[in-house]
């Protein structure tokens, strides 16, 4: 009877220990992007990149502080709306996630960063490029892509020095991203000796651009720059063609997607578009990116749009910091994350500066030919 009692107690203790162990093993990481709305295709791509990172890490096995852990993704939709972005940010804080990958847009990443900072939760954006994102002094804010100063500036110089643009028009969608990259582009054009003949505005939900484009047609621009996303750029290009506007069409990473070909349809001529993606690899590092692209296609049955590899790297960097710190508690691994140096990701070697910006961020310039995105060059 006594032996049976002892065995029962031992079994109960084992069960309790197992339950506690199972609970201790789960590490939740949040991801936020627009899963609904006009750029849902980009948000879903980002979420896929996060899922792929979680799955790969769980398959390899992750040990933090001597314990094998199971990573779980807490995915939320901000619909590219700042109000919804702050609401889901608070939801993730309340869930006590260990960190957040996102948001996709600068317009949602910036207000959400204040909430994560107040909670002490690290946030790494794979795609927010507005300089203000890392200029608020929050110790929890990081990004793995170059900002708009670099991106817009590079495109502005390219418009004048390489495309030999004589009369350049600028349109932006009034979002934090679109306005920011357009302003940096215009500054660089003027500094390079170019001339801005018109500045126009639209919204990220607009579909009719005829009034704006008709005004621009009278200015006879040879280059039109659009600060915004592919969902607006595509229809805009169709309407440019209808008006007989044959100007070069430029934009940042928001338009530099594989989906732009479908969205623009016959409105895009070969070589007409020049865009830049924040990031880029070349030489020996290209093999890693090519493998990621192939693995992603095999896993999800679709092509990478633009930001997926940066999401993948961001999540892996966050977990690597947890492993190195021996803890998934934000306060304990945050200092290690901030000191990330030459992490070898699929998007290249990644280090953070004192603001949380990626050091020596690369840009890749692209055009489109025969319905496919074609790389021009990688610049730093």
Image (cartoon, helix red, strand yellow):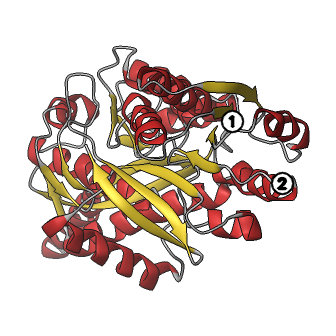
Q: Picture coordinates of residue 266 (x, y %)?
A: 75, 70
Left or right of 333 on screen, residue 54: right
Assign a secondary structure to mark 1: loop
Q: Can you identify the residue that label 2 sits on?
A: 239
Residue at coordinates 56% horizontally, 33% vertically from top-left?
177
> Residue 337, located in which quarter of the rendered image?
top left
Q: How many marks?
A: 2
Relative to 16, say whether 130 is above or below: above
Find residue 376 and report its horizontal and vertical position in percent. 38, 61
The residue lying at 55 percent from left, 39 percent from top is 105
Q: Position of residue 341 (x, y in %)?
A: 11, 41
User: Relative to the observer, which residue lies in front, 325 or 225?
Assistant: 225
The reply to whether residue 20 is visible in this rendering is no
Residue at 69% x, 35% y: name it.
81
Is residue 68 found left or right of 217 in the rendered image?
Answer: left
- Report the side of 132 relative to 98 (left or right): right
Residue 23 sits in quarter: bottom left
Please state which of residues 365 and 259 is positioned toward the viewer in this rendering: 365
* Quadrant (top left, top right, bottom left, bottom right) of the N terminus: bottom left
Which of these two is toward me, 236 or 207? 236
Q: Percent x, y for residue 368?
A: 54, 67
- Residues packed near mark 2 inside 10 Å, few (<14), some (14 to 19) or many (20 plus): many
Q: Quadrant of the C terminus?
A: top left
Whether residue 104 is visible to the viewer of this picture, yes or no, is yes
Which label number is shown at residue 259? none
Crowding at dot 1, Cα within 10 Å, few <14 / some 14-19 / many 20+, comes out as some
Indicate left or right for 337 with 261 as reference: left
Q: Nearer the viewer, mark 2 or mark 1?
A: 2
Callout 2 secondary element: helix
Q: Image quarter for residue 289?
A: bottom left
Residue position for label 1: 81
């Amino acid at each position: 009877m006594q032996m049976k009692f002892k065995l029962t107690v031992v079994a109960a203790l084992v069960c309790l220990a197992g339950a506690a162990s199972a609970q201790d093993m789960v590490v939740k990481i949040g991801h936020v992007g627009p899963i609904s709305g006009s750029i849902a295709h980009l948000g879903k791509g980002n979420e896929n990149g996060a899922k792929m990172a979680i799955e790969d890490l769980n398959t390899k096995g992750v040990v933090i502080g001597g314990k094998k852990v199971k990573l779980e993704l807490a995915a939320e939709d901000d619909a590219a709306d700042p109000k919804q972005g702050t609401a889901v940010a608070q939801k993730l804080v309340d869930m006590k996630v260990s960190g957040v990958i996102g948001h996709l847009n600068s317009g949602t990443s910036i207000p959400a960063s204040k909430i994560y900072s107040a909670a002490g939760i690290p946030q790494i954006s794979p795609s927010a490029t507005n300089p203000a994102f890392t200029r608020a002094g929050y110790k929890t804010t990081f990004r793995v892509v170059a900002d708009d100063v670099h991106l817009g500036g590079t495109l502005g110089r390219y418009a004048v020095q390489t495309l030999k643009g004589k009369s350049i028009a600028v349109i932006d969608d009034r979002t934090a991203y679109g306005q920011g990259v357009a302003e940096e582009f215009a500054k660089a054009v003027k500094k390079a000796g170019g001339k801005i003949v018109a500045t126009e505005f639209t919204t990220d939900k607009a579909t009719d651009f005829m009034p704006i484009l008709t005004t621009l047609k009278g200015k006879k621009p040879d280059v039109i720059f659009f600060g915004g996303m592919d969902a607006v750029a595509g229809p805009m290009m169709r309407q440019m063609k209808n008006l007989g506007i044959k100007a070069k069409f430029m934009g940042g990473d928001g338009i530099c997607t594989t989906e732009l070909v479908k969205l623009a349809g016959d409105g895009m001529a070969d070589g007409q578009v020049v865009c830049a993606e924040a990031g880029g690899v070349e030489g020996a590092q290209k093999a890693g990116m090519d493998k990621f692209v192939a693995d992603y296609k095999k896993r999800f049955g679709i092509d990478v749009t633009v930001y997926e590899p940066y999401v993948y790297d961001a999540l892996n960097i966050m977990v690597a910091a947890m492993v190195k710190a021996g803890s998934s508690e934000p306060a304990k691994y945050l200092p290690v994350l901030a000191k990330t140096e030459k992490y070898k990701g699929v998007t290249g070697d990644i280090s953070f500066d004192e603001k949380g910006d990626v050091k020596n961020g690369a840009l890749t310039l692209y055009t489109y030919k025969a319905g496919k995105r074609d790389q021009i060059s990688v610049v730093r």
